[in-house]
Amino acid sequence: NAGVMQNPRHLVRRRGQEARLRCSPMKGHSHVYWYRQLPEEGLKFMVYLQKENIIDESGMPKERFSAEFPKEGPSILRIQQVVRGDSAAYFCASSPRQGEQTQYFGPGTRLLVL
Amino acid sequence: DQQVKQNSPSLSVQEGRISILNCDYTNSMFDYFLWYKKYPAEGPTFLISISSIKDKNEDGRFTVFLNKSAKHLSLHIVPSQPGDSAVYFCAASLNTGNQFYFGTGTSLTVIP
């Protein structure tokens, strides 16, 4: 039973480019969460999605960031016009149902903006 | 606004001894707490959790203690092993919420 998959594991972008991060939840999980870890900090919640629905995006920056979890395929976190401050590790987690007390994390995507 | 705090960025312990990792929180509405373990270049791995209705939960070498009045929890690892060397994150959640609130982590080194 494969765990949470994220790709790419490492992504380098120049300022102004777009970054697309993908997350495939564990088999049987339909709830996806995105977190960001800045250097020397803990993980910070960004957004919670179910299939085709954004449930809670209270942690998402108001501009340039968007997320989706389509009916088919992985969840995607999209960052437009990246800036150096977007450099961080982005982790995806999944759970089988809402209210599930444990979230299972993927290996993360390390984004570096030059 | 850091609602979950881990004030010790690092800890070194001799193999076989007890490791005690501490975590404090400010939001009295948190009702579930977790510890995650993280190796470099990997995602956090769930370790152990505790509900706010309990004050202790044990799983093998790992025990989590919760002191609600002090808004403090701790993770005890006994005996510590070199493979336990990792960064440990404390996390908390609200019954009505969907997100986890993470501390900044404590890097544990177990010396052989």
Image (cartoon, coloured by chain):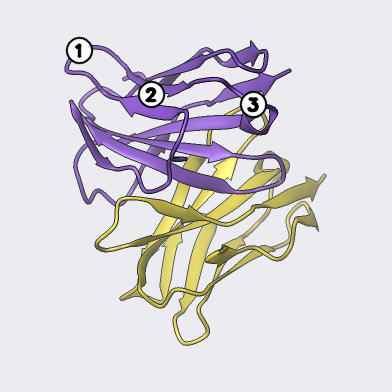
Chain colours: A purple, B yellow
Q: Amino acid at mark 3?
A: Val
| Numbered disc in front, either 1 or 3 | 3
Quadrant position of the C terminus of chain A in the picture: top right
Q: Is residue A10 above or below residue A31?
A: above
Disc 2 residue type (three-letter): Gly
Quadrant housing residue B40: top right
Q: Which mark is residue A83?
A: 3
Q: Are marks 2 and 3 in contact (CB under 8 Å)?
A: no
* Residue behind mark 2: A3
Image depth: mark 2 or mark 3 in front? 3
Residue A5 percent coordinates (x, y): 42, 19
Say what secondary structure mark 1 lies in: loop
Residue B24 visible? The answer is yes
**Badge 2 sits on which subunit?**
A
Check disc 2: other Cα within 10 Å, few if <14, some if 14-19, many if 20+: some
> In the depicted view, which residue is nearer to us: B46 or A93?
A93
Question: Which mark is drawn over residue A72?
Answer: 1
Question: Does residue A91 lie above or below B107 as drawn?
Answer: above
What residue is drawn where x is 68% and y is 21%? A112
Q: Secondary structure at mark 2?
A: loop
Answer left or right for A81 relative to B85.
Answer: left
Q: Give the amino acid at mark 1.
A: Glu
Residue A98, quarter of picture: top left
